[in-house]
Amino acid sequence: MAKKKDVLLDHEYDGIRELDNELPPWWVYLFWITIVFAVVYMFHYHVFKTGDLQIAEYNKEIDPNWEPPEMDENGNLISIYRSPFSSPKGDITPFIQKQFASFVGPDLTSDALIMEAMRRSDEKTLNKLKADFPELFKQLSAGGAAIIPKKAAVKETIEPMEALTDAASISKGKELFTKNCVSCHGAQGQGGIGPNLTDDYWIHGAGMAHVAHTITVGVPAKGMITWRGVLSPDQIKQAASYILTLHGTNPPNPKAPQGEKFEYPLQ
Ligand code: HEC
């Protein structure tokens, strides 16, 4: 630290005098770092243009195929990038296109998308879409009257699950099956009203997780009730485990295969 009189400046105003102290080193370093940072920043973003500015970053995020607008040598724009959301008939982002192309086809316009959404929506959403786009609603078959709103979808996920293999569980499963299921699936699971449960073919997926899931949620539209609520989760597990033991038993009078063939042993 310098002596007070060395750093005392020679001016005085109304008795106030000034000391010319050194700045603390941390402050000085920080100052130099900000200057270096600013230079690096300027060259990276504005001179070499190796970094994306905010607008480019944003555009790339909503459209992975985005290209920066072209400029001529005077810096005037030759082509202007249009946001996929800017015009009603404009391009839809490739991401959405991929998701919807399978059912709307390649000529994907936002009109087609909205109509598809109408076909798939539940009542509340349908009413809203109908109010917002009455023209499009009219374009749908029979003026839109043919649309039956879907009930709000119930989200079901299939959790991986191990089959029970102990004799007690299997025999409990057999009991449950005999009591609840044979009327439709046959005494030996050979099938009847319901499908054959002993072959390699499954409509709703083979293996413990799928079979337990099918039993739990049922296929009410096809006559297989939702067993959740009738059977406990443990009982469903027992019934499903028993059904798995029926595979390959070749009972007499089997029902013809239904669904997709699965390769056994299952992976
Ligand atoms: C009223 C008739 C009926 C009863 C009772 C019934 N099911 Fe079903 N079950 C069906 C029908 C019909 C299907 C086929 C659904 C379809 O076509 O999508 C089916 C499908 C299944 C499937 C899926 C088969 C596949 O190929 O993916 C399983 C597993 C099954 N039932 C298990 C059971 C169990 C366990 C019980 C008793 C707790 C039971 N079912 C009771 C009619 C019934």
Image: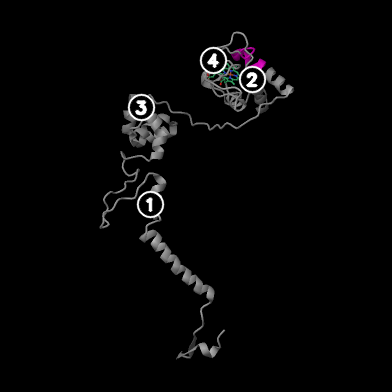
Q: Where does the image place residue 29, in percent across and percent down from the top left? A: 50, 72
Q: Depth check: give the residue in front, 127 or 139.
A: 139
**The N terminus lies in quadrant:** bottom right
Q: Which of pointers 2 and 4 lies earlier in the amino acid sequence? A: 2
Badge 2: how crowded within 10 Å, few (<14), some, or many (20+)? many
Q: Which of pointers 1 and 4 lies earlier in the amino acid sequence? A: 1
16 versus 31 height, above or below: below
Compared across the picture, whether 222 is left or right of 45 comes to right
* First to last magenta residue range: 177-189
Q: Which residue is mark 3?
A: 144
User: In the picture, residue 42 is in which quadrant?
Assistant: bottom left
Which one is closest to the eye, mark 3 or mark 2? Answer: 2
* Residue in the image at 71% along x and 23% along y: 169
Q: Where does the image place residue 134, in percent across and percent down from the top left? A: 33, 33
Q: Where does the image place residue 154, in percent across and percent down from the top left? A: 52, 31
Q: Which residue is mark 2?
A: 243
Q: Amino acid at mark 1?
A: Ala
Q: Which mark is residue 56?
A: 1
Q: Which of pointers 3 and 1 lies earlier in the amino acid sequence? A: 1
Which one is closest to the eye, mark 4 or mark 3? Answer: 4
Q: Which of pointers 1 and 2 lies earlier in the amino acid sequence? A: 1
User: In the picture, residue 143 is in which quadrant?
Assistant: top left
Compared across the picture, whether 168 is left or right of 185 comes to right
Badge 4: how crowded within 10 Å, few (<14), some, or many (20+)? some
Label the magenta part by its dominant secondary structure.
helix
Q: Which of pointers 3 and 2 lies earlier in the amino acid sequence? A: 3
Q: In the structure shown, which secondary structural element does the residue marked by tag 1 occupy?
A: helix
Q: Which residue is mark 4?
A: 257
Q: CA distance from mark 3 to mark 2?
A: 44 Å
Residue 189 seen:
yes
The reply to whether the residue tagged 2 has its Cβ within 8 angstroms of ligand 1 is yes
Q: Where does the image place residue 121, in percent across and percent down from the top left? A: 43, 32
